[in-house]
């Protein structure tokens, strides 16, 4: 069982109540950090309205507000009905970026570090039932070398603070995911674990229920609501005859209803959808339901115009429809766990997910310098102990949240860190051992992490830790682009021959490759930034992929154009998308549809 936050996705039934608190909230920046001293948690002095979910950076017309760094506050009045008497009551946040201090009726009830995972603030002891209550949250979005994602802060000439991200996506911040008022029984289901065995046409679902009851009743139903099996006990197995297995081709979902009992009386109930499937690595193959599967798809971002990273079911629906059209089966949640709604919908659509913790920026170089081998060790810094603690906490919370999603097939524990030194190896050996030795994942899914270009066969130290070796490569773009693309292909083949000689007996997947492309640009002959050149780069990579049977997947960078910090190498953001930021196809989308279909 994972330690850390236990935050089951909200459901509503006879025993559980929830109410979305999404709306326009009050908002105020606190550049001098005087809010605590002046008791802003009682009432903000000069607030403006701000949507929740939402991010101020996409809504402002002022540069200093867009790039605001420091403390800021949200507040909202919350009516809590009296019929919730004798319940445990909490405010559940899908996430707050990057850290939060929660006050309810002027009492501090919760602090949380980490901007991409949910947490609950228990308000049972301070809530006023049948009345309007006051909720206030102090948020801070400063980056540091002791938290993930990594970055630092500089002070501008006018005294303002400015984040300096060590990652290539915009540092959106605020309350960007759903906020709920939730009420649960005093005796309740806290969590549950699932794992599966498949024997021919039958399957076993092994479950363990965590809660303060004597026993449990577990009912499995088919997609039509018919009962398939019933079992009792807090820990047991369910036999499923003629099991319908979950896969991208047939994402069959069963219903599972868990009832917690005490002295023969039902005291709580939780229902959700599950899919029966297994995932494992055998030699150079990735096996889904004991059959080899080749991963094809995208690295993505939670990113959309005006919304930033704010959760929108409409964006999720559009993205998944585009992905089905193009013929993919997989995506990586680069470079952080996404909102839970993405996973719930991926379960229904049949997409495979490589779930990534926000361990990005763990390097002493920028992404351009990395391609040239210019770096120094990051992990000799004195921040390692605190960083390791935060890293482990966020891995625990990610696995704890997503472990029962059949769409999740692997955990990615880093993206493009410094990875060639002894120090980096020892740091990440602790991280990988933490997951394996503590058995955080009851299904023991494969572990991976994305390696940058300097992690070559003769220099890399981290591939030995991974069950799946994931490579981010930009031959033809950052390495030997334009007229030198043939030289890029030669360097690419030389590298892959080096990996082949090592005979690691592990599957390799490409978690990033591609080229920036403006949707307006066409050039003959093909030139960098044109759609023709993006297609040429894709063809070059696919030509190399098919030469090596240990390559088991290609996730192109990126699904869609996305926002980054201002930079001379960026035209309004990263333009490597196969779709534009508003989800219209570039020419490469039609090429990939042909290759993948």
Image (cartoon, helix red, strand yellow):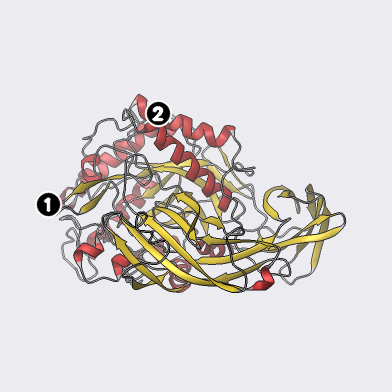
Q: Nearer the viewer, mark 1 or mark 2?
A: 1
User: Which residue is nearer to you in this view: 482 or 277?
Assistant: 277
How far across and down, in percent of the image, does residue 43 sit?
Answer: 40, 67
| Image position of 384 (left or right of 467) | left
Name the residue located 60 percent from the left edge and 41 percent from the top edge. 444
Residue 225 seen in render: yes
**Which residue lies under the disc numbered 1?**
157
- Name the residue at the front extreme: 38
How far across and down, in percent of the image, does residue 464 sit?
Answer: 45, 30
Q: How would you rate the neighbour count of disc 2 (Cα within 10 Å): few for under 14, some for 14-19, many for 20 or more? A: many
Residue 350 seen in render: no
User: Which residue is nearer to you in this view: 308 or 114?
Assistant: 114
| Image position of 408 (left or right of 386) | right
Name the residue located 57 percent from the left edge and 45 percent from the top edge. 4
Query: Which secondary structure, mark 2?
Result: helix
User: Which residue is nearer to you in this view: 459 or 564?
Assistant: 564
Q: How would you rate the neighbour count of disc 1 (Cα within 10 Å): few for under 14, some for 14-19, many for 20 or more? A: few
The earlier-in-sequence mark between 1 and 2 is 1
- Compared with 94, 587 (above or below) is below
User: Which residue is nearer to you in this view: 326 or 472?
Assistant: 472
How far across and down, in percent of the image, does residue 169 sit?
Answer: 30, 55
**Which residue lies under the disc numbered 2?**
425
């Amino acid at each position: 069982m994972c330690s850390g936050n236990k935050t089951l996705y909200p459901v509503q039934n006879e025993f559980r109540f929830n109410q979305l608190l999404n709306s326009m909230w009050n908002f105020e920046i606190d550049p001098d950090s005087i809010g605590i001293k002046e008791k802003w948690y009682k009432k903000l002095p000069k607030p403006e309205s701000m949507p929740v979910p939402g991010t101020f950076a996409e809504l402002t017309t002022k540069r200093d507000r867009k790039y605001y760094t420091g403390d800021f506050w949200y507040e909202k009045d919350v009516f809590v009905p009296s019929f919730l008497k004798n319940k445990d009551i909490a405010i559940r946040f899908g996430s707050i970026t990057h850290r939060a201090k929660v006050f309810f009726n002027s009492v501090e009830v919760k602090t949380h570090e980490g901007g991409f995972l949910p947490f609950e603030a228990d308000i049972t002891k301070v809530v006023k039932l049948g009345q309007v209550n006051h909720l206030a949250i102090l948020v801070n979005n400063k980056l540091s070398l002791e938290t993930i994602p990594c970055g630092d802060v500089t002070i501008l000439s006018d005294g303002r603070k400015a984040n300096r991200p060590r990652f290539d996506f915009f540092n959106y911040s605020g309350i960007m995911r759903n906020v709920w008022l939730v009420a649960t029984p005093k005796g309740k289901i806290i969590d549950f674990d699932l794992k599966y065995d498949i024997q021919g046409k039958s399957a076993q679902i092994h479950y363990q229920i965590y809660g303060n009851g004597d026993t449990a009743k577990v009912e499995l139903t088919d997609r039509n609501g018919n009962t398939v099996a019933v079992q009792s006990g807090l820990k047991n197995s369910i036999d499923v005859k003629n099991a319908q297995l979950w896969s991208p081709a047939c994402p069959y979902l069963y219903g599972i209803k868990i009832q917690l009992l005490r002295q023969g009386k039902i005291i709580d109930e939780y229902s959700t959808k599950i899919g029966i499937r297994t995932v494992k690595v055998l030699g150079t193959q990735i096996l889904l339901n004991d059959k080899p599967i080749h991963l094809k798809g995208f690295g993505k971002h939670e990113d959309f115009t005006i919304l930033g990273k704010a959760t929108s079911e409409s964006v999720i629906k559009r993205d998944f429809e585009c992905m089905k059209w193009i013929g993919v089966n997989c995506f990586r949640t680069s470079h952080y766990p996404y909102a839970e709604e993405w996973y719930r919908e991926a379960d229904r659509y049949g997409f495979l997910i490589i779930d990534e913790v926000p361990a990005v920026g763990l390097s002493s170089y920028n992404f351009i310098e990395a391609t040239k081998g210019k770096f120094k060790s990051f992990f000799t810094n004195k921040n390692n102990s605190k960083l390791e603690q935060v890293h482990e906490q966020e891995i625990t919370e990610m696995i704890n949240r997503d472990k029962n999603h059949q769409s999740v097939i692997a955990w990615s524990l880093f993206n493009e860190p410094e990875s060639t030194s002894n120090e980096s190896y020892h740091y990440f050996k602790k991280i990988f051992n933490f997951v394996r030795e503590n058995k955080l994942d009851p299904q023991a899914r494969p572990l991976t992490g994305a390696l940058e270009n300097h992690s070559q066969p003769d220099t890399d130290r981290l591939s030995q830790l991974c069950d799946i070796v994931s490579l981010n490569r930009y031959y033809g773009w950052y390495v030997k682009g334009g007229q030198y693309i043939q030289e890029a292909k030669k360097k690419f083949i030389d590298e892959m021959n080096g990996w082949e000689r090592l005979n690691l007996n592990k599957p390799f997947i490409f978690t990033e490759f591609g080229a920036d492309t403006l949707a307006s640009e066409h050039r003959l002959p093909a030139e960098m930034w044109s759609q023709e050149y993006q297609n040429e780069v894709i063809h070059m990579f696919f030509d190399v992929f098919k030469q090596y049977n240990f390559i088991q997947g290609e996730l192109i960078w990126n699904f869609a154009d996305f926002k980054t910090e201002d930079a001379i190498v960026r035209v309004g953001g990263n333009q490597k998308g196969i779709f534009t930021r508003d989800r219209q196809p570039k020419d490469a989308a039609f090429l990939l549809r042909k290759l993948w279909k």
